């Protein structure tokens, strides 16, 4: 039994010694061959990265619209825009006019053909929608419109 304990102690001593050697060799290797542009993946005490790169809130309540054009093609688009959430009256107006925004977008795009949509550049389409949206708003205006999705399916 004494031989078994001595043998186990010797194996544990050798294992610990090999792990220490591996730790020292790995540390020396990392210090010698470290690239000068290497950055740590996480710095302690540093703020965590923000989840969203956009600081301003985006109004997304209009949602994804599927609109049939005059020549029976389908247009899929998701209009979104920035707004000021501290302006409570304007925010409430936006919430109440979502059905109008959907109707305006559907009637405008639905009155066009695929050929007309192709001729109409995306920036011009956004500008036309902004003008129509702002025509029904009285407490504020939309300045920039984003189309998260914009597809014409024939």
Image (cartoon, rainbow, N blue to C red):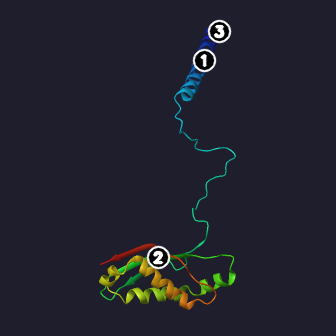
The earlier-in-sequence mark between 2 and 1 is: 1
Q: To which residue does mark 1 refer?
A: 17
Q: Which mark is residue 98?
A: none
Q: Position of residue 111 (x, y in %)?
A: 37, 90
User: How far apart are labels 2 and 3 at the CA level?
Assistant: 78 Å
Nearer to the camera, 17 or 25:
25
Q: To which residue does mark 3 refer?
A: 2
Which residue is rendered at x = 64% and y = 76% of the image? Answer: 84
Nearer to the camera, 85 or 154:
85
The earlier-in-sequence mark between 2 and 3 is: 3
Q: Closer to us: mark 2 or mark 3?
A: 2
User: Which element carries disc 3, helix, strand or loop?
Assistant: helix
Nearer to the camera, 114 or 2:
114
Which residue is rendered at x = 38% and y = 88% of the image? Answer: 110
Which residue is rendered at x = 56% and y = 81% of the image? Answer: 142
Q: Closer to us: mark 2 or mark 1?
A: 2
- In the figure, is residue 76 to the left or right of 2? left
- In the figure, is residue 154 to the left or right of 78? left
Q: Which mark is residue 78?
A: 2
- Is the Cβ of the residue at disc 2 closer than 8 Å to that at disc 3? no
């Amino acid at each position: 039994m004494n031989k078994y304990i001595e043998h186990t102690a010797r194996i544990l001593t050798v294992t610990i010694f090999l792990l220490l050697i591996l730790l020292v060799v790995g540390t020396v290797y990392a210090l010698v061959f470290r690239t000068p542009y290497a950055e740590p993946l996480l710095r302690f005490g540093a703020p965590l990265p923000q989840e969203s790169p956009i600081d301003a809130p985006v109004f997304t309540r209009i949602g994804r619209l599927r609109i049939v054009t005059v020549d029976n093609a389908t247009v899929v688009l998701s209009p979104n825009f920035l707004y000021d959430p501290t302006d409570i009256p304007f925010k409430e107006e936006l919430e109440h006019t979502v059905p109008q925004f959907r109707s305006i977008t559907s009637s405008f795009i639905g009155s066009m053909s695929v050929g007309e949509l192709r001729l109409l550049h995306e920036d011009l389409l956004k500008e036309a929608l902004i003008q129509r949206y702002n025509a029904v708003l009285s407490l504020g205006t939309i300045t920039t419109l984003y189309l998260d999705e914009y597809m014409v399916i024939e």
